[in-house]
């Protein structure tokens, strides 16, 4: 199973934009593996989490876990 990677941003005039970036291969189900895959993909596009304002994931524990989930690791 692949994961869809989508980027949301807001233009200078306030218009929200959603862009499909790519499908990420299933590199595993652990947050460590997912973090590596996401960070590699972001770097390919010269995008850096330090410039992001929010992250959005489904409610799976490996994605949104408060301490060790993907969202916490990227934050």
Image (spheres, grey):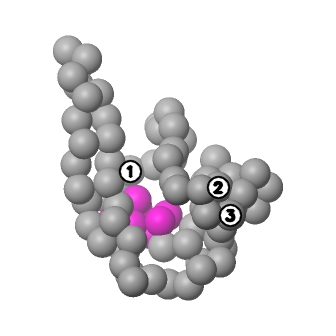
Give the residue at x 49% y 64%.
39
Magenta range: 38-44
Tell me what residue is drawn at x 25 percent, y 29 percent: 16
* Relative height, residue 13 to residue 3 (above, below): above
Of residue 57 and residue 38, the one placed in the foreground of this image is 57
Mark 2 surroundings within 10 Å by alpha-carbon count, few (fewer than 14), some (14 through 19), many (20 or more): some
Q: Residues within 10 Å of mark 3 (few under 14, many from 20)?
A: some
- The residue lying at 57 percent from left, 67 percent from top is 35
* SS class, disc 3: helix
Q: Residue furthest front?
A: 59
Which residue is denoted by mark 2 in the rendering?
64
Residue beneath the point at 31% across and 35% down:
9
Give the numbered dot on residue 47: 1
Coordinates of residue 63 in the picture (x, y in percent) = 60, 61
Image height check: is 11 above or below 17?
Answer: above
Q: Relative to residue 15, is residue 28 drawn left or right?
A: right
């Amino acid at each position: 199973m692949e994961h869809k990677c989508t980027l949301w941003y807001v233009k200078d005039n306030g218009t929200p934009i959603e862009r499909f970036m790519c499908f990420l291969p299933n590199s595993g189900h652990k947050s460590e593996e997912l973090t590596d895959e996401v960070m590699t993909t972001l770097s390919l596009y010269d995008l850096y989490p330090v410039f992001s304002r929010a992250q959005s994931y489904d409610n799976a524990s490996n994605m949104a876990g408060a301490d060790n989930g993907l969202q916490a690791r990227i934050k």
